[in-house]
Image: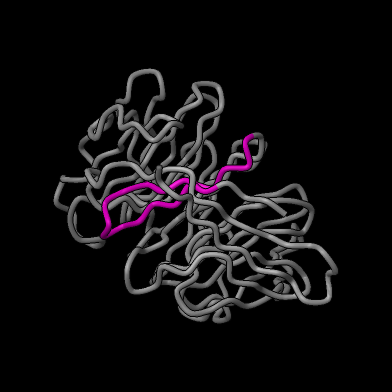
Amino acid sequence: MKKALVIVLLASGFGATAQSLTLKWKTPPNIPVPESVAFEPKGNVLYVACINGKPEEKDGNGTIAKVGVDGKIVAVDWATGLDAPKGMGIYNGNLYVADITQVRTISLATGKITSSLEIEGAQFLNDITVDKKGNVYVSDTQTGKIHLVKGGKAEVYFESPELNGVNGLLALDNGLYIVSFATGNSYKLGADKKLTPFTKVVEGADGIVAVGKDEYLVSNWHGEVYYVDAKGARKLVDTKDKVNAADIEYDAKTKTLYIPTFFANSVDAYTFSK
């Protein structure tokens, strides 16, 4: 009988309150450099961005894998013809993918790329989030810019020297939440374009997901996951220097966190409790 891995952190000053992540399953290590996971609730399936090479190379080797919520790999090459796909977002039957200097649109019905939008001045597009209106926001870690894709056109939505190494994005009703890979800082960007510091984790911050009102999980690419709220950040997972934790995804219904492990070539699923 396999013992489940449970990593629990008691939050000081919160009485009996605790947050935990319990390992649920791991896929076989057959997913080539998974960088991001997107959960599609209608199909109850996971889409995984596979770099399958170097993160900055336009080599045509990138794919999108399809994985069941039970951890079984359905297909490693559900979608092909990408370079080094990273962050993803889903809206209205389409999967939007950040791919170095392009935003790709892939039909969920066919797995085919239906458009490739070149973002002017882009160098290293990294994460994507889509709001309820279908606006696609994409971060560029090299330039510190956040681009907005709307109606098939792109524009610079926000840029600031403070967003050095901008990476993870999360669109919520009250604003855009942002984490910086370079500094570990996280911010809220309001509709008025006011940038407000939220909290700080560590250098290497990658993905951000909401797990409650003003509560988040933030991954550190080097192999950590933090529970974050206005009171600070508490580490829940530490596989640092062993297994990476790239651009995470969360299913609120099953309280499952999905972690793409990059060089470990798997997706790991954890149950979140608090």
Classify residue 116 by image quadrant. top left
Q: Nearer the viewer, residue 242 or 94?
A: 242
Q: Residue at x 64, y 72 (%)?
A: 234
Residue 34 at what x, y percent from top left?
31, 50
Q: Is residue 256 above or below residue 210?
A: above
The answer to whether residue 145 is visible is no
**Is 248 on the left or on the right of 213, as rendered?**
left
The magenta stretch spans residue 119: no
**Is 69 on the left or on the right of 179, as rendered?**
left
Q: Nearer the viewer, residue 3 or 260?
A: 3
**Is 251 on the left or on the right of 196, as rendered?**
left
**Is 214 on the left or on the right of 244, as rendered?**
right
Classify residue 80 by image quadrant. top left
Instruction: Give the colour scheme of this rendering.
Output: one colour
Q: Residue at x 77, y 59 (%)?
A: 214
Q: Residue at x 50, y 70 (%)?
A: 205
Q: Residue at x 43, y 31 (%)?
A: 70
Residue furthest out toward the top: 109
The quarter in which the C terminus is drawn is bottom right
Residue 153 at what x, y percent from top left?
47, 43
Residue 29 at what x, y percent from top left?
24, 47
Q: Nearer the viewer, residue 56 or 64?
A: 64
The part of the chain drawn in magenta is 254-270
Q: Looking at the image, how many numbered discs can be counted on the residues?
A: 0
Residue furthest out toward the front: 1
Q: Is residue 29 above or below residue 134?
A: below
Q: Nearer the viewer, residue 128 or 208?
A: 208
The quarter in which the N terminus is drawn is top left
Residue 140 at what x, y percent from top left?
43, 64
The answer to whether residue 58 is visible is yes
